[in-house]
Amino acid sequence: MPNISNVTNPVPGQEVSSYKPSVTPNDTQIQNIPDPSRVGRSDSRTEREDTATSSGAKRYDSNFQAFLNSLRDAGSISETLTRFLISRPGVLVNSGMSAGISQEIAELLKMLKVDEKELAALLRGQLSASTRFGSELFQALRDALKQNASASLQNDILQFLKKYNDFSSTPHIERNIQRLIKQMSWFMPQRFSDPLNEQLSQLENLLSSGNRSGALKLLQNGIIPYMSNYVSQMHERGIARNLLGMLVLDIARFQNGSPDELLQSFYKLLGYSAVKNSLGNPDANEVLSMLQQNAENANSAPSPLPDLLAQITSRSMLGETNADMKQSLKALVDSILLNQSVYMPLSHAILPVEMENRMMFSEIWVDPDDDNNSSGGKNQRSMRLLLKFDIQDLGFFDLIITYREDDTIDLAINCPPHLSEFNKIFEEKLSELATKDGLKTSNIKASAMVKPLSISEVFPKIFERKDSINVSI
């Protein structure tokens, strides 16, 4: 039996081993641990990279860059939803769906059948959200900003717009506040949720009676301290704390959009001569009435189509439809959310319709303050529009319209390649339509489509962030 207590000879071939321990007691430069179950050396990765892999890692230092990446990857949803609308509606309605949502989709397909007048009304309804800042007051502010583009005036106008946006969104903010408090009570034990529900009932009574100051006082001095004490006492670091954070933001908007705050910001603008010359010195009640009327017009829903689409999408996400429709509706929601980003300086609308027995899905982007003057006068205000539409049995089209103040327009249409022989006819028809509406055509061009146009190609100002919205509170 060998004596294991003695030092043995080294194994042949390993006399000069260069093995060293991976971690020495004095090595404290350990960071970015890929696997918390073991300790390793630094792996030369930055703190902003994903823990799994460095390739295609998400970056958390730029929301704007994330928006641009999403915009680049999203493209247009016209092709996806056109397939959904065209491919045998009867089969779509009946395969893999509950009876309730099948009826809603049947109503939707019936609603899509429109004529020319109904199409125009539907388009106006889709773009109605842009009228939130479309009254004479806001036009006067735009004109004043052109006359006096000082940093102080621009900052004061932006502050007023923030307050007006919160003021016009008051019904939505109030619903959010009540919903968040109700959700908070669901995650509390009964001994905590009962007092919170009592305060919620008081809040609902104050809001229904129009007592905004009383509701704000209850939120700041009652509900928020109570919820904060619960989170601290129960060491709640999950859903309850997240709900509390969202509630604080909504309360900040609720306070920022009060009529007193709005009037104070408005009268501050009247201190600038460019604004006062356009607006004079209106009475406070007149200002509030005008802004309230403008907000009600923007919040009204002239068409039931958006609400019906929202209902169908919600039920689809809950699993009441087949996988194909769920994917199409998810693409629709992603596109709507992307085009409502604070970094998107364009108005956006979608038009799924059926005209003359043909299905068509269209997306429209409008820039009312286009600064691309390559084909127009330097001092002329212009508007640019990108229209993407996919027509059943014809294909996918891109149309760019540039309109200037002197009623001249430029038109450029990209047609499916198999229709290129009709390019001359397209140009003639577009010219006839423009002349019929009293417009002068400066340049008309029809060509075969090589690839669909991206939004950033038509509107390069997106990359410049000139018209993005500052949403800081």
Image: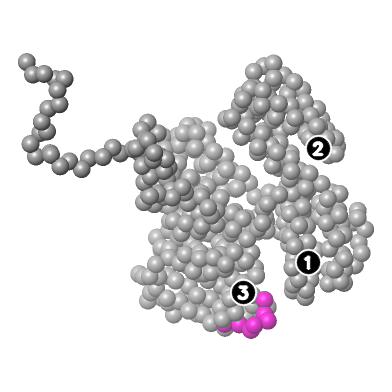
Asked where in the image residue 208 lies, by quadrant, the reply is: top right
Q: In front: 343, or 403?
A: 343
SS for callout 3 = loop
Residue 268 visible in the shown view: yes
The tag on residue 371 is 3
Q: Residues within 10 Å of mark 3 (few under 14, many from 20)?
A: some
Q: How was the colour assigned to the protein in this rendering?
A: one colour
Q: Is residue 380 magenta?
A: yes
* In this rendering, the label closer to the viewer, 1 or 2: 1
User: Percent position (x, y) of residue 278?
Assistant: 85, 70
Where the N terminus falls, by quadrant?
top left
* Separation of marks 1 and 3 at Cα, in angstroms: 21 Å
Q: Which residue is mark 1?
A: 153
Asked where in the image residue 234 lies, by quadrant, the reply is: top right
SS for callout 2 = helix
* Separation of marks 2 and 3 at Cα, in angstroms: 42 Å
Residue that appears at 39% across and 52% down: 56
Horizontal side of 91 relative to 133 (left or right) equals left
- The amino acid beneath tag 1 is Leu
The tag on residue 216 is 2
Q: Residues within 10 Å of mark 1 (few under 14, many from 20)?
A: many
SS for callout 1 = helix
Residue that appears at 41% across and 63% down: 395
User: Percent position (x, y) of residue 66?
Assistant: 50, 54
Asked where in the image residue 462 lies, by quadrant, the reply is: bottom right
- The amino acid beneath tag 2 is Leu
* Separation of marks 1 and 2 at Cα, in angstroms: 30 Å
User: Percent position (x, y) of residue 305?
Assistant: 60, 48
Tell me which numbered mark, 1 or 2, is placed earlier along the sequence. Answer: 1
Q: In front: 254, or 205?
A: 254
